[in-house]
């Protein structure tokens, strides 16, 4: 329903943008390599994509303009494309988006694109069989609409959108994105591919550090007093997890049963850490902590990179730096 409503709103907004911002409806192909003033335009919906592109391009910013749409810190699941955003997408040379349920509005953006040579990259499609269904594990609180669907006998498969939280997925996606950038700018294709390979090696190195940390750990269970967008990371390193809600949940209040179950699990597994995601008020985690026997567990953050603002970027936040910090938090929770 949400996607249908936004489809109408976005289409109307795009028409307004086209009428006010375009002098002609005919698409115009520009040879940007030959035009010293024109730049190739890349539009990214989420921060990990944006950071990957910056690393692949390196100092080639004289030829590329890279736009990050969610730079006000809005969450992927709450983002609403404006008419201005739709125009930027429609004029882009490369558009990178996640491709999950939250991106239902993208079909209209692509259909109404003014640049008929626009290359779209759907990360979910690019990963193919690596995509996982959203999973409700023991003790996890189901959403009300899921319960209604179960009672009605209808169950729609939902896929976990948080694909960037696997370093292995990140490597595959960097490969795909670098190929598209090289296709757009064949003059610098070799340099683009070389930088991509160098960045992929950094991803592989960090992946090895995660593997070693888990191998050396005293146990292999993590527990979240929050949403759980880390399914891909947990599966990569064979971690068992418990959480209050699935990664895409809109729930903010945990039931008594959920709190009790998670507090009992902390005691049973002797877990030293209860995790939350970034920008959490930590209310659920603190309530779980208060209901454990020891009441002295640390509450640590694992950053899912869903709400990165331009201020965060200016302060030096990067994908790799964030995943390194997450590794430190994981190590503390597994020992």
Image (cartoon, helix red, strand yellow):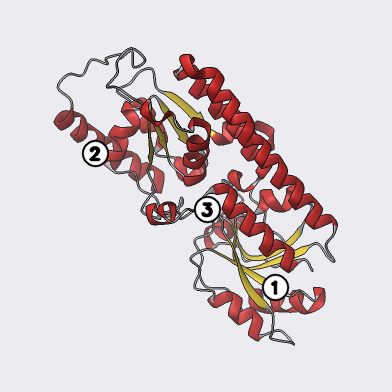
Closer to us: 278 or 255: 278
Tell me where residue 298 appears, x and y as whole percent.
66, 77
Q: CA distance from mark 1 to mark 3?
A: 20 Å
Residue 157 makes an appearance in the image: no
> Residue under circle 1?
273
Residue at left offset 75%, top offset 50%: 209
Q: Residues within 10 Å of mark 3 (few under 14, many from 20)?
A: many
Say which label, 2 or 1, has the lower sequence index. 2
- Crowdedness near tag 1: few (<14), some (14–19) or many (≥20) residues, C-alpha within 10 Å: many
Residue 258 versus residue 171 in the image, above or below: below
Kindly indicate whether the residue at mark 3 contacts the one at mark 1 (C-beta within 8 angstroms). no
Q: Which residue is mark 2?
A: 13
Q: Is residue 189 above or below residue 216?
A: above
SS under mark 3: loop
Task: Check whether the beta carbons of the residues at disc 3 and disc 2 lie within 8 A of each other.
Answer: no
Q: Residue at x 56, y 55 (%)?
A: 304
Q: Position of residue 154 (x, y in %)?
A: 59, 48
In the image, 104: left or right of 299?
A: left
Q: Quadrant of residue 37?
A: top left
Give the quarter of the image for residue 202.
Answer: top right
Going by the image, does 104 lie left or right of 195? left
Going from the N terminus, do you reach mark 3 or mark 2 first?
A: 2
Query: Can you tell which mark lies on residue 305?
Result: 3
């Amino acid at each position: 329903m949400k996607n249908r409503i936004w489809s109408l709103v976005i289409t109307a907004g795009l028409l307004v943008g086209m009428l006010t911002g375009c002098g002609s409806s005919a698409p115009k192909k520009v040879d940007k390599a030959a035009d010293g003033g024109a730049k190739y335009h890349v539009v990214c919906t989420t921060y990990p994509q944006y950071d990957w592109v910056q690393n692949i391009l390196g100092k080639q910013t004289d030829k590329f303009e890279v736009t990050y749409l969610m730079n006000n810190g809005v969450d992927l699941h709450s983002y609403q494309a404006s008419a201005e955003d739709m125009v930027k997408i429609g004029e882009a040379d490369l558009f990178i988006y996640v491709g999950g349920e939250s991106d239902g509005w993208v079909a209209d953006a692509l259909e109404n694109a003014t640049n008929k040579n626009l290359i779209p990259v759907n990360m979910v499609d690019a990963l193919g069989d690596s995509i996982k269904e959203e999973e409700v594990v023991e003790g996890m609180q189901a959403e009300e609409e899921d319960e209604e669907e179960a009672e009605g006998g209808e169950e729609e498969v939902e896929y976990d959108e948080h694909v960037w939280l696997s370093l292995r997925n990140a490597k595959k996606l960097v490969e795909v994105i670098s190929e598209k950038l090289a296709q757009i700018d064949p003059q610098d294709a070799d340099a683009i591919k070389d930088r991509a390979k160098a960045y992929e090696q950094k991803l592989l190195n960090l992946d090895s550090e995660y593997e070693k940390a888990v191998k050396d750990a005293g146990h292999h269970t993590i527990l979240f007093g929050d949403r759980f967008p880390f399914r891909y990371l947990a599966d990569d390193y064979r971690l068992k997890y418990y959480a209050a809600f699935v990664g895409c949940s809109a729930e903010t209040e945990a039931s008594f049963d959920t709190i009790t179950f998670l507090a009992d699990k902390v005691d049973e597994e002797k877990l030293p850490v209860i995790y939350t995601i970034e920008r959490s008020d930590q209310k659920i985690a603190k309530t779980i902590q208060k209901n454990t026997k020891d009441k002295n567990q640390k509450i640590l953050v694992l950053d899912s990179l869903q709400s990165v603002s331009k201020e965060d970027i200016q302060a030096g936040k990067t994908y790799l730096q964030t995943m390194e910090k997450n590794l430190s938090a994981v190590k503390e929770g597994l020992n």
